[in-house]
Image (spheres, rainbow, N blue to C red):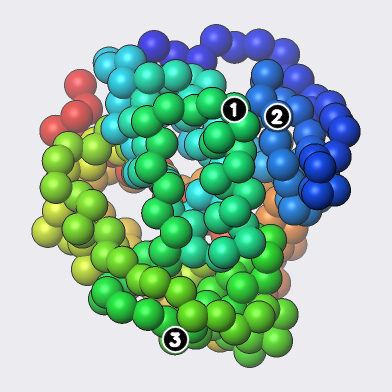
Amino acid sequence: MTLQQTPAQAPSAVAADDDDTPRERIRGFDVLINDRQNFHILCKDVFERRIYHFDSDSAEPTIIDCGANIGMSVLYFKHVYPGARIVAFEPDPSVARLLRRNVEANELRDVEIVEAALSDSDGSQTLHADGKYASMLDKIASSDARAAGTATDVRCVRLRDYLTDPVDFLKMNIEGAEWSVLRDTADRLELVRSMVIEYHHLPGLPRTLHEILALLDRCGFEYLINDFDDKTNPHVHPPFRLTPRTSYYLLIHARHRSCMS
């Protein structure tokens, strides 16, 4: 079951919700949003360019969405596979509230929302929450993230505890925590058929791309790397200039070799 190729459909604005939260509509879904610019970028990347698309022989694939934000990826998965079973993680309380409302407003079934950050240990940690799309845990947060966010304590869980059965697709966008979570989950990654990981190269963060790629190779995955485009990712536009302040993002698409024909 795959998404039919159709002309890109621009989102259309609809009336604000009762509490004045802005709303948009895309592909038949009503979406409560918190940042209009981010919403339009997500429309481009998720619905038009289909960065999280995957092929499945099952009409009811199991999906783990790490960093679901307001739910645009969840809506895409349900657009392609209405019968999908999804576990969606989102730690920012104000963002998780919109995620939950978007799931409920669109009557999406088989979506479990886990309001927690993914980490390599259970417990509570400080999250620097920006209320939009770039919240970071304190132990990896840059000075920029600390200055931009509101410090709040959030529950942390380990991804490995949710990887107990085969998973058709894993999507990960967790703002710099990707390496520590993947390392902690390494012995269970073979349960995942395919995944897309967003790698964050941001000022102050450790450089772990080489470690992530080496881990994927050891765990039996083939992979390719994509840099979005220069609208989402302006620093990838030539001529290239790397400085300690350079920010960029990469998508790592990986598929387990046992699932490749």
* Kind of residue sitting beneath label 2: Asp
Provide residue 181's location: percent of width, then percent of height: 31, 66
Q: Residue at x 44, y 86 (%)?
A: 139
Q: Nearer the viewer, residue 171 or 18?
A: 18
Q: Name which of mark 3 and mark 1 comes first in the sequence.
A: 1
Mark 3 or mark 1, which is nearer to you? 1
Q: How many marks?
A: 3
Which residue position holds label 1? 106
* Kind of residue sitting beneath label 3: Lys
Which residue position holds label 2? 30
Q: Nearer the viewer, residue 21 or 138?
A: 21
Using the image, tell me which numbered label, if any, was put on residue 161.
Answer: none
Which residue position holds label 3? 139
Q: Residue at x 68, y 19 (%)?
A: 28
SS for tag 2?
A: strand
Which quadrant is the C terminus positioned in? top left
